[in-house]
Amino acid sequence: MSAISDRYDRAAARYQKWWAPVLEETAVRVLDRLAGKLPLDEPQRIVDIGTGTGTLVLEALRRWPQSSLTGTDASSGMIVGARERARTELAQADQERLSLVVAEADRLPFADASFDAAVSSFVFQLVPDRAAAFREVRRVLRPGGLLVFVTWMLSDIRFAADEAFFDVVDELRIPDQDGPEEDRTGDLVSPRSAADQLRRVGYRDVSAAQEWLEYRFDRVAYVDFLEEYGESDLFRSLEPRMRRRLRQRATERLESLPATDFDWRVPVVMAVARRG
Ligand SMILES: C[S@@+](CC[C@H](N)C(=O)[O-])C[C@H]1O[C@@H](n2cnc3c(N)ncnc32)[C@H](O)[C@@H]1O
């Protein structure tokens, strides 16, 4: 098991509550792009790479009512989360059109040309070898099949709510964490670099553009978000007394900020390509 899938296994339940909603509106734009190119009223075979708790597969089942959907993820915990959502949110007939499989993006357990389309949201920044993953997705697409994905674009945009939180961390002299920083090295440098990489491994009709993910965090719930998801390692590392103090001081500070300081706006790259 890789460090990444281990991390997502541990976070699966909290992911669905705290992080999937942040990504959702931007993630489903992938399906908007695909819908313009893949007829909705014909049976299609669609695979979602790194499905997480199933945001894209669940929505795609609704949009392509005759199609079969396959969600893959390297983390078995995330696949369990997706299965649970499918069980509670989908009618039986729709559940039968869905399969969920634990698999790394660069080792997909499917025959060549198994799918008409592949989709993915916020995953290709995490794979250890992106070119290998693009090649593997190409292998499982039929000739002419489509890949549409969105992921982060590298940026150093600041977020006022986080800056206020870390000011409080500094004021309380909470030491730097020993744990690894979130690795952002896989974020795409530019739409052009993504397009070039896709062309190099044999995709054609490639387009890639910068778009924005915009999300307003709930000011009242933001400390809960940080404690339970965003900065859970930091909170967990503290003695109960310091943890309570951090919560209290951070709550006071965050409540003093205007609601607009909780508007998160970050660039993403949306890419569309066809198997040559
Ligand atoms: C940020 S989440 C995105 C999940 C989902 N696509 C969404 O939009 O909510 C990243 C997902 O990629 C999965 N992942 C990470 N590395 C992977 C890999 N090499 N192959 C397949 N999935 C991977 C993680 O387990 C996690 O579920």
Image (cartoon, grey):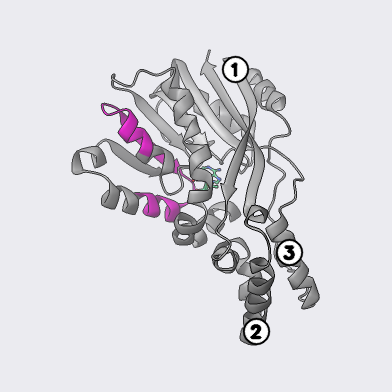
| Residue 84: percent from left, percent from top | 32, 54
Front-lying residue, 79 or 254: 254
Secondary element type, mark 2: loop
Residue at 77% over, 78% down: 172
Q: How many marks?
A: 3
- Vertical position of residue 125 compared to residue 239: above or below: above
Residue 63 in sight from this viewpoint: yes
According to the picture, the residue beneath numbered tag 3 turns out to be 164
| Circle nearer the viewer, 2 or 3 | 3
Front-lying residue, 23 or 77: 23
The question of residue 74 being in magenta is answered with yes
Front-lying residue, 179 or 268: 268
Q: Is residue 25 left or right of residue 99?
A: right
Q: Residues within 10 Å of mark 2 (few under 14, many from 20)?
A: few
The amino acid on which the numbered mark 3 sits, given as a three-letter code, is: Ala
Q: In the image, which disc is placed on residue 239?
A: 2
Secondary element type, mark 1: strand
Bounds of the magenta segment: 59-82
Residue at 64% over, 48% down: 264
Instruction: Using the rendered view, name the quadrant where residue 168 is placed.
Output: bottom right
Q: Are marks 2 and 3 in contact (CB under 8 Å)?
A: no
According to the picture, the residue beneath numbered tag 1 turns out to be 206
Does any atom of ligand 1 lie closer than 8 Å to the CB of label 1? no
Q: Is residue 62 left or right of residue 134?
A: left
| Residue 247: percent from left, percent from top | 63, 76
Does any atom of ligand 1 lie closer than 8 Å to the CB of label 3? no
Instruction: Using the rendered view, name the quadrant where residue 240 is placed.
Output: bottom right
